[in-house]
Image: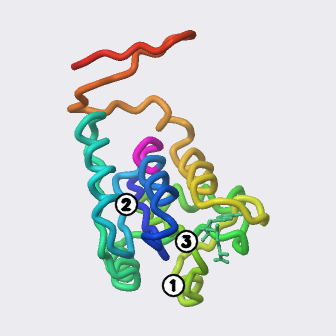
Amino acid sequence: MEVVVLRLGHRPERDQRVTTHVGLLSRALGAKGMYLAGQDSGIVRSISRVVEQWGGDFFIEDKVKWRRCIEEWQKGGGKVVHLTMYGLPVRECEMAIRDAGKILVVVGAEKVPGEVYGLADWNIAVTNQPHSEIASLAVLLDRLFLGAELSADYPGAKIRIVPCGKGKQTESL
Ligand SMILES: C[S@@+](CC[C@H](N)C(=O)[O-])C[C@H]1O[C@@H](n2cnc3c(N)ncnc32)[C@H](O)[C@@H]1O
């Protein structure tokens, strides 16, 4: 399945760390890329550096117009999942989302425009409690990929970690 993340409401002065983590988490848990509705070349640079070093072909694009991004995704045959604590329980919808195959996952920062709730094919909650876009995205991706993302390969990596029970070991490739 193909999953891309759309990050809304990014405020460069407040959200840099969280948005960077949304990108890193998306890459680490199997998404193909992240669209950022907003301008932040620092985030684009830092995620691109990670891809260069750690491999894979994750993309990041800023200055994206969110409404156009959603509509074009749907025109291209994809479905849109909006993560919100007001949505339906993830466990009720995960099978249908998985079956859809091509998914754009929308996560907010500040208040998400009301129009997004109407445009989304699913408004999905990871519990109906307030928490975080990073956490809700992690749970959704793990459920969509059924855990297979946890052992993905990252072709073209310059460095890789050699897993070990104690200490730190890396290998240059
Ligand atoms: C810190 S929250 C702020 C949400 C904002 N107060 C609003 O009402 O839209 C940022 C993002 O985290 C995600 N989020 C927070 N809690 C969630 C939950 N229980 N289930 C799914 N997503 C959640 C949503 O994508 C939300 O836009």
Residue annotated with mark 1: 119
Q: Tell me where residue 141 appears, x and y as whole percent.
A: 54, 50
Q: Decide which of 129, 100 is in the foreground and name it.
A: 129
Residue 111 painted magenta: no
What's the residue at 39%, 75% (across, down)?
37
Determine whether the residue tagged by mark 2 lies in a helix, strand or loop: strand
Amino acid found under the numbered disc labelled 1: Leu
Whole-number angstrom distance, CA of label 1 to CA of label 3: 14 Å
Q: Residue 65: in sight, yes or no?
A: yes
Report whether 85 appears left or right of 64. right
Whole-number angstrom distance, CA of label 3 to CA of label 2: 13 Å
Q: Tell me where residue 94 appears, x and y as whole percent.
A: 62, 57
Disc 3, ligand 1: is the CB inside 8 Å? yes
Q: Tell me where residue 43 appears, x and y as whole percent.
A: 35, 58
Q: Going by the picture, which residue comes out furthest to the bottom?
A: 115
Which residues are the magenta region?
26-30
Decide: few, some or many residues near mark 3? Use Cα within 10 Å; few <14, some 14-19, many ≥20.
some
Sequence order check, earlier mark of 2 and 1: 2
Decide: few, some or many residues near mark 2? Use Cα within 10 Å; few <14, some 14-19, many ≥20.
many
Q: Which of pointers 2 and 1 indicates the residue nearer the eye?
A: 2
Quarter location, residue 97: bottom right
What's the residue at 26%, 35% (across, down)?
53
Q: Main secondary structure of the magenta part?
A: helix
Whole-number angstrom distance, CA of label 2 to CA of label 1: 19 Å
CB under 8 Å between discs 3 and 2: no
Residue annotated with mark 2: 34
Q: What numbered label is drawn on residue 108?
A: 3
Quarter location, residue 85: bottom right
Amino acid found under the numbered disc labelled 3: Gly
Report whether 155 appears left or right of 122. left
